[in-house]
């Protein structure tokens, strides 16, 4: 329900922002507020996803505040998630290496895009 409400609010803010910009001829807008709500919607989505993955295996609920304050350990969650499908240490290590390779590939691709953009 919270995610739906936040998504509706973001859509409403976009509509109101367009009206404010038109009325003030672009002198005023709500872009900062919209960015904050967009961030909250993403955080809520992550919390819902994480909550669905742990099935009650974590003592504290996944909330935006708990994650921001470090009450919930994302490292513990990742370890639990890995153990669900990698029952041996070797399988877990192979999974970690694959994840690291994907991450490094994406970082390299992102830096290539930035270099291309800077040269243009």
Image (cartoon, rainbow, N blue to C red):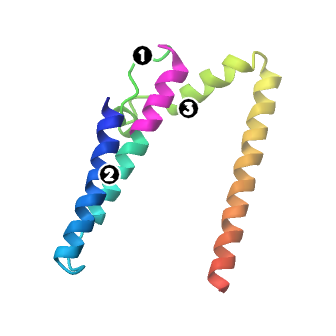
Q: Nearer the viewer, residue 2 or 24?
A: 24
Q: Residue 74 at what x, y percent from top left? A: 51, 32
Which badge, 1 or 3, is on the more N-terminal residue? Answer: 1
Q: Residues within 10 Å of mark 2 (few under 14, many from 20)?
A: some
Q: What is the number of the mark on residue 59?
A: 1
Residue 65's place in the image compared with 52, above or below, is below
Position of the N terminus, as image quadrant, is top left
Which element carries disc 2, helix, strand or loop?
helix
Residues in magenta, as a range:
44-56
Residue at mark 2:
11
| Residue mark closest to the camera, 2 vs 3 | 2
Under circle 3, the secondary element is helix
Q: Earlier in the sequence, mark 1 or mark 2?
A: 2
18 sits left or right of 94 in the view = left
Residue hosting label 3: 75
Residue at the left extreme, as displayed: 23
Q: Residue at x 43, y 44 (%)?
A: 42
């Amino acid at each position: 329900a919270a995610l739906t409400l936040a998504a509706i609010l973001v859509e409403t803010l976009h509509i109101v922002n367009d009206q404010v910009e038109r009325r003030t001829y672009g002198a005023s807008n709500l872009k900062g507020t919209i960015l904050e709500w967009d961030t909250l919607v993403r955080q809520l989505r992550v919390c819902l996803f994480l909550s669905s993955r742990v099935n009650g295996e974590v003592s504290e609920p996944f909330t935006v505040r708990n994650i921001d304050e470090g009450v919930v350990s994302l490292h513990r969650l990742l370890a639990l998630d890995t153990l669900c499908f990698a029952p041996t240490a070797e399988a877990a290590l192979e999974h970690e290496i694959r994840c690291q390779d994907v991450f490094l590939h994406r970082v390299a691709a992102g830096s290539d895009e930035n270099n291309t953009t800077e040269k243009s």
